[in-house]
Image (cartoon, rainbow, N blue to C red):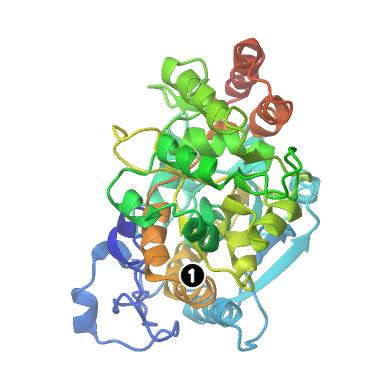
Amino acid sequence: MKLPRKLTSLLLLSLILAETSACGSTSPDTPDNTNPTDTTSSDVTTRDPASVCDIPDDVRFDGETFTFAIYENANTNNHMLVDEEDGDTMNDAMFKRRRMTEERFGITLEELVYDDNPSKFRTPILAGDNSFDIGNIRCTDALSFWQDGIITPASELPYVDIDKSYWNRSFNDSLTLCGQQYIAIGDMMTSTLDLTYALTFNKKLAENYAIGDIYSLVRDGKWTFDEMLGMMKTATQDTNGDTKMDDQDNYGYSANPKNVLPSFWISAGELSVKKDENDLPYLAMGEERFINVFQKIYDITYGSGTYFKPAGDFDVTDEQRKLFNNDQLLFMDCSFFYVQQLRSMETDFGIIPYPKYDEDQNRYYSRVSYYNAPIIPVTNSRLELTGAVLEYFNWASSETVIPAYYDTVLYGKVIRDDESREMLDIIFDARVVDIGDTTLCGDIRDGAIASMFKTEKNNLASKLPNLKTVVDKFVAKMPE
């Protein structure tokens, strides 16, 4: 699907409404539906080659059964398959994707659903049980599976071409280690959309406090930490006049404490863990600019008295949503999974990216806090089938599920103004994965960083030696 404006650099997803052996054909940017229709061969020749699935026509696997294994999670929809159409746009798009894939290869697709426990995936592999062909697991577990030698790297699969538009190239560049693509993320993994973070802002409060045109600031490249801080200060009010700030008052910004620091440092163009010339991770939190950004985040939150610290450990807590719904919160940190849950909110809200550190920064960056990773167990000996299904299923997702997610779920059910539609292009155009915020989140983001911010202390310098040890041990486990 080719999304509006400049989303093409990351999500160059063709809205290809065709069901041919070449995998599809191009259609306008704003389709009336997500059902592929027949197209002529002359149409195919005019398409962007990057949007064409090149699996040869004679590649079929008649009579085979192919099994996905997924886990249940409260923060994203992990299912790959549905059994029937029910009138819901996303459900029906998923059903169409399934039928397209089954008919293309003459196969049957099945899905195993496990509890949210990596041992459910690991145990059958270690036992030599080929109970699933692809397992969609947490990103934190995928790398350990590779380090333990129990998965086949995505780079070894036939037919898989991650240069195609339905694979997320910028994601996959960050998912190489030692020069090897151990997993690859494509359009079938909508968790990368669900878990993209942005700022929602309460339009009623913005109008009441004469905040100004935030959208213009974003467009003009002037949406910065300092601009956001000024608005946060304006919106923070002791509304009941009792001289203490609590959940009865108004605030400028709220986010789960574990999300504050990584959301801002990523939007500032920084990473907690970077990779060297050998494609190996190293801790980057001791670099001068990172330290300056880190301190600035404390200044604009705790230092300004504009931040509401919610209780609870959900990615977007009930307290945050309550304040936002009650017109007590100007800016709320929110993943797109939770943005969809705001559609019943009476007060209008807008969606914008997190700000740049300053105007000298050349672009905006959006944080992806987590993702699910498709792994191929070493027990799977049908690599030709697996590569073909994985490639086609991602292409089929760009035909069906991605248009449904973007154009119907977001545009049709959530987005309330044309400006927010424009902001989606900016937000999704520069999604970033930070190893310290994803793969190593247990020790870095949810460990030292979350604890530090919850206690309102900036003692990063004292944490750096231990954090470096975490990364060094991680690197030491890399397969040779």
Could one spot residue 150 in this view of the protein?
no
Badge 1 is on which residue? 415
| Mark 1 nearby-residue class (10 Å; few <14, some 14–19, many ≥20) | many
Residue 468 vertical placement versus 203 (above, below): above
Q: Residue at x 34, y 61 (%)?
A: 12
The structure residue drawn at horizontal position 33% and vertical position 66%, both measured from the top left corner, is: 54
Point 33% across, 49% down: residue: 217
Which quadrant is the N terminus positioned in? bottom left
Name the residue type under label 1. Ile
- Using the image, determine if residue 371 lies above or below residue 409: above
User: Which quadrant does the C terminus fall into?
Assistant: top right
The quarter holding residue 22 reads: bottom left
Farthest-out residue, front: 241
**Residue at horizontal 44%, vertical 30%?**
270
Q: Position of residue 360 (x, y in %)?
A: 28, 32
Residue 66 makes an appearance in the image = yes
**Quadrant in which residue 37 is drawn:** bottom left
Horizontal relation, residue 408 to residue 149: left or right: left
Q: Whole-percent x and y of residue 286?
A: 51, 15
Give the camera-side residue of 469 and 22: 469
Q: Position of residue 161 (x, y in %)?
A: 38, 55
Number of numbered discs on residues: 1
Task: Give above or below for 29 relative to 312.
Answer: below
What percent of the width, then of the height, locates residue 29?
A: 31, 75
Q: Nearer the viewer, residue 215 or 316?
A: 215
Tell me the element at label 1: loop
